[in-house]
Amino acid sequence: MTRWIKILEPLSIISLLGCAIWIFYGTPTESEMGFVQKIMYLHVPSVIVAYAAFFVVFAFSIAYLWKRDIMFDQIAKSSAEIGEVFCALVLITGAIWGKPTWGTYWVWDARLTTTLLLFLIFAGYFLLRSFTRERERAARLAAVLGIIGFLDIPIIHKSVEWWRTLHQPTTLFKVEAAEAKPAMPMELLLPLLVTMGAMLLFYVYLLLLRIQMEQQYDTLQELIANNEGG
Amino acid sequence: MKSTYKFLIGSIIILVVLAALSIQGLQEMTVFFHTPEEILKDANTFENKTIRIGALVQSGSVDWDSKNLLLSFRITEDSQHFIPVVYEGIKPDMFREGQGVVVEGKMKGDTFYAHQLLVKHSEEYKLDPKEHKAKKDYYKTLDKS
């Protein structure tokens, strides 16, 4: 794992820097919004990373409840922390984009409210963990909340279709887009997709690093407990 | 036994209150705005109540009085039901004819008096061939101001 961390560290950071330079100097300016549209390159990849991170929480929480292997809990916890950071980034970049585009930082429409809910559920996830002393019990309770919390994501994704929202419908992953003209020109789409890839790489790096820390911490706790016992 | 009972009753009360609150909140959230058709159909119910209407700005209906900061225009969703809107304040940069907007305010008679004007953004991203030079144009606008 240490080897992967060492490879991913420069790789993800350099590719993110490269994307930033590309976004600001190499991509054309969108004609309706102008320069403000550049925020999309941080907002949308952050959404993807938050979704991915919470999906990892979901998958490894189920795995933990099934196999009761503490490693699965270490992975879920680490991923939840990163997901929460990127979820905050989504809310912040969205607000900064919303002010010049919509005319407001925040509205209580379905898309924004369900996204805030996701952030709050995982804030609760960490509170729950810190209030529960016993390691196994904390892992068990957190796993249940992690699974429930993830179920908010399909609701967020579909919220713009199910309800009337201020937030625009999905541009990417549009099923009917194949027949119509693409909702985003290639000159804007390509840098977005590449930035997404770079962000996901960065996520994997952070995740591995965090899991390693978590394992070292648990090993240390075990050593202390053994020392006191003997 | 008795404390378990109290705990159970307490939790049920909290759950019921929470459920009631979230259902109410959800109704408000799921209908972020009404359409002009809904408003005109049921004019009496909406009279003098703070509501949001979402629709498109009718082309050619915009009148912007920059001295008094008075913006008036008509909105429609289906080109059949029109509502005239009056908004006092700064015209948003993204405000355009044919653009989707969400206005918050009150119906007074036939006119909607908005205190907030939000501009919807469509899911489509466009490139103007003239502005394809990207960065250079941006500096130009900076020079002018």
Image (tube, coloured by chain):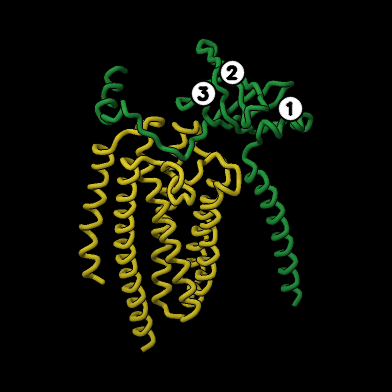
Q: Is A29 placed left or right of A94 in the picture? A: left
In the displayed structure, would residue B73 be above or below residue A81? above
In what quadrant of the picture does the N terminus of chain A appear?
bottom left
In the displayed structure, would residue A149 be above or below residue A109? below
**Residue type at numbered disc 3:** Glu
| Residue sticking out furthest to the front | A179
Q: Which mark is residue A112?
A: none
Identify the chain of the residue marked 1, using the numbered disc in the image.
B
Measure the alpha-carbon separation of dots 3 and 1: 27 Å
Q: Which mark is residue B97?
A: 3
**Residue type at numbered disc 1:** Asn
Q: Is B121 placed left or right of A78 in the picture? A: right
Q: Colour of chain B?
A: green
The chain drawn in yellow is A
Identify the chain of the residue marked 2, using the numbered disc in the image.
B
In what quadrant of the picture does the C terminus of chain A appear?
bottom left
Residue drawn at (56%, 48%) of the image = A161
| SS for callout 1 | loop
Q: Which residue is mark 1?
A: B48
User: In x, y percent, where is residue A65?
Assistant: 50, 77
- Residue depth check, mark 3 versus mark 2: number of the one nearer the observer: 3
Q: Which residue is mark 2?
A: B72
Measure the alpha-carbon separation of dots 3 and 2: 12 Å
Q: Are marks 3 and 1 in contact (CB under 8 Å)?
A: no
Return the disc, 1 or 2, that comes first in the chain's sequence: 1
Residue drawn at (70%, 48%) of the image = B24
Q: Is A181 placed left or right of A3 in the picture? A: right
In front here: A75 or B83? B83
